[in-house]
Amino acid sequence: MNALVNRAKNFLVNEDGPTATEYAVMLALIIVVAIAAVTLLGQSVKNVFTNVNSKVSSLPSE
């Protein structure tokens, strides 16, 4: 029983758990921002490549 109490105290005092949780939250926020950026910029980039493709396709071949 004493070992269980000591383990519980060590768990509550240990700062590795909250640090790992903070890193996980930061990683999740970075992923959300990256997905949002790709979603917002995706259509614009697609349009640019479509325009370039149409311009290159309309060039006379040698």
Image (spheres, grey):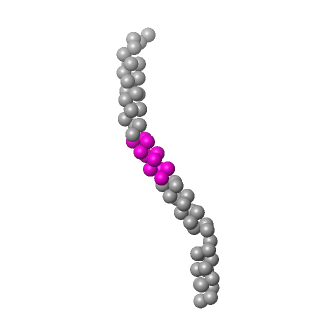
Instruction: Name which residue lies at 39% across and 40% down.
Output: 40
Instruction: Name which residue lies at 41% across and 32% down.
Output: 45
Q: Nearer the viewer, residue 40 or 46?
A: 40
Considering the whole magenta stretch, tell me its main secondary structure. Answer: helix
Describe residue 16's horizontal placement relative to residue 51 as left or right: right
Quadrant of the rendered structure where residue 59 is? top left
Residue 21 at x, y = what percent? 53, 63
Furthest residue toward bottom: 1
Quadrant position of the C terminus in the picture: top left
Residue 60 in the magenta stretch? The answer is no
Up the image or down, 34 lies above or below 4; here it is: above
Range covered by the magenta-colored residues: 29-39
Describe residue 37's horizontal placement relative to residue 11 as left or right: left
Quadrant position of the N terminus in the picture: bottom right
Residue 29 at x, y = what percent? 48, 53
Instruction: Name which residue lies at 45% across and 47% down.
Output: 33
Instruction: Name which residue lies at 62% across and 71% down.
Output: 14
Up the image or down, 29 lies above or below 55; here it is: below
Residue 36 in the magenta stretch? The answer is yes
Q: How many marks?
A: 0
Q: Nearer the viewer, residue 26 or 35?
A: 26
Quadrant of the rendered structure where residue 46 is? top left
Up the image or down, 32 lies above or below 17; here it is: above
Residue 55 at x, y = what percent? 38, 19
